[in-house]
Amino acid sequence: MTEQNQDREREEMETDSRPRDQTSRAVDLNGRERTGDLQKQSEASDSERNSGFSQWEDSRMLVPSSLELGPGAVDKYVISKQIVKMQEPRRLTRDDMDERRIIYPESQNRALVNRFRHLRTKLLEVSGGNNFTMVVSGASEGAGTSFMALNLAAAFAFDQSKTALIIDCNLRNPTLHSQLDLAADNGLTDFLEDSDYDIARIIYPTGIPRLRLIPAGSQRDTPAEFFTSFRMKQFLQAIRRRYPDRFIVLDTAPISDSPDARILGDLCDYSMLVVPHGRVTATIVENAAQAFNPEKFVGAVING
């Protein structure tokens, strides 16, 4: 192995990374911007979907004993080599990104790009630079949660040494697969429902470098039952611990309309609230914020 591809030593991830300052932060997102991964127990293989491009997601990810090892059990990661293998069978053009209102480093909308970069920086400060799982939920219907979640994940994927995974957990009204123009036949609920289901079948390239999507799936009748399952908890722990340079964003239904965001918030490291500018009262925002675990709540973002 060349010097350029040597394993990089990683510090052990702490089990309880909490922000020192729990004060809510608000970032105003421009008035014109509107609503929008064990081969057995020892190796991580590169298998993503059943196609001919290079694959890096492990198709047998959930081996319970691996989760009992705890933080620091895996001491070394060949991150740069793995990330290079993340090929895209298709790439979204700049026009595609502009049309879908997805940020990218060369975007002409510098103000919007910089706002998401600023938000990314603030979140990294809270996490101490460690990767994390985070729920993004709206204070009300039409808050622009999917727009915020997708662009935040895209901002993390800007960094060539990091990857992002966005999971569509809005089972009542999933939109990410259509926003990314993907024909998603399988997704999260299919995986959760079948213990023998291959993880590779639900992880989709998005057309955006280093960003992957897990769609909602075909079974959407009882969201709370999926999210309260042990398999969901196991799944989130595994994808976070296995790859320390991956940031996981969960796009959820509005916290005002369902308990999904609160349930998922208890499983994740952080929770963030999206507030539509000028469309909800202070009382609604306060009630929505109080629904989250205060130890995990990183603040509210104003969208509109």
Image (spheres, grey):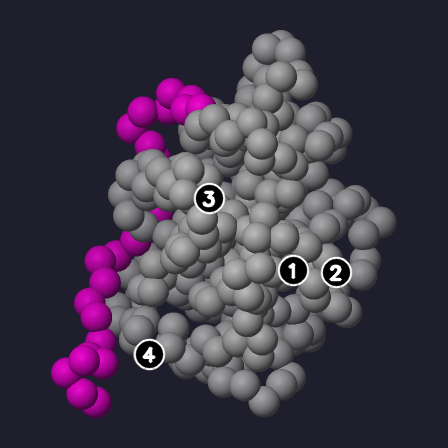
Earlier along the polypeptide chain: callout 2 or callout 3? 3
Q: Horizontal and vertical percent for residue 287?
A: 62, 16
Residue identifier under label 3: 109
- Asked if the residue under mark 1 is in contact with the one under mark 4, i.e. CB atoms within 8 Å, the reply is no
Q: Amino acid at mark 4?
A: Lys
User: SS of the residue at dot 4?
Assistant: helix
Residue ID at (20%, 67%): 9
Q: Is residue 80 above or below residue 272?
A: below
Locate the C terminus and report the quarter of the image it occupies: top right
Residue 14 belongs to the span the image colors magenta: yes
Given this view, does label 2 or label 3 mark the residue nearer the observer?
3
Q: Determine crowd level at label 3: few under 14, some 14-19, many 20+ residues with C-alpha closer than 10 A.
A: few
Given this view, does label 4 or label 1 mark the residue nearer the observer?
1
User: Position of 218 compared to 84: left or right?
Assistant: right
User: SS of the residue at dot 2?
Assistant: loop
Q: Is residue 243 above or below residue 153?
A: below
Boundaries of the magenta span:
1-26
Residue identifier under label 4: 81
- Asked if the residue under mark 3 is in contact with the one under mark 2, i.e. CB atoms within 8 Å, the reply is no
Instruction: Say the numbered circle drawn on residue 217.
Output: 2
Residue identifier under label 1: 180
Distance from Cα at disc 3 to Cα at disc 4: 32 Å
Q: Horizontal and vertical percent for residue 84?
A: 37, 77
Q: Amino acid at mark 1?
A: Leu
Distance from Cα at disc 1 to Cα at disc 2: 15 Å
Earlier along the polypeptide chain: callout 1 or callout 2? 1
Earlier along the polypeptide chain: callout 4 or callout 2? 4
